[in-house]
Image (tube, helix red, strand yellow):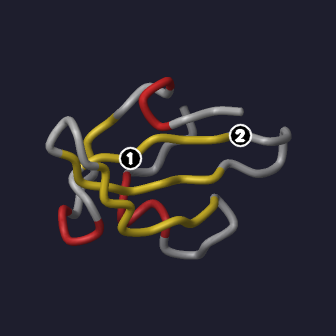
Amino acid sequence: MYTLPQQKIKSTLIKTYGAYYCQYKPNKHTTWYITFDTNDKIWLIKNIFNNHTKDYPRYIGNFEN
């Protein structure tokens, strides 16, 4: 099981959907993106979407890794 603190955390382009995001790649075709805000103790997940979502590059950037 993967948890947010174990994943590499990156900044988002649009802070409305969370200041940070991390990725979860369960297979070679799909990458899930979790956007969130944090104050080190509390993690507020604001959005979950994947690379099949039409507008995902707008939120985090046009890249997979």
Q: Is residue 65 above or below residue 57?
A: above
Q: Pointer 1: what residue?
A: 21
Marks 1/2: CA distance? 13 Å
Q: Quadrant of the N terminus?
A: top right
* Label 1 SS: strand
- Left or right of 1, for residue 5: left
Q: Position of residue 38 (x, y in %)?
A: 22, 47
Residue at 19 percent of width and 35 percent of height: 40
Q: Position of residue 64 (x, y in %)?
A: 57, 40
Q: Quadrant of the C terminus?
A: top right
* Label 2 SS: loop
Q: Pointer 2: what residue?
A: 25
The residue at the far left in this view is: 39
Total numbered circles: 2
Q: Residues within 10 Å of mark 2 (few under 14, many from 20)?
A: some
Q: Is residue 61 above or below residue 9?
A: below
Which of the pair 44/14 is nearer the observer? 44
Q: Position of residue 37 (x, y in %)?
A: 24, 54
The residue at the far front in this view is: 41
Residue at 36 percent of width and 32 percent of height: 9
Residue at 79 percent of width and 42 percent of height: 26
Which of the pair 12/57 is nearer the observer? 12
- Left or right of 18, for residue 53: right
Which of the pair 51/43 is nearer the observer? 43
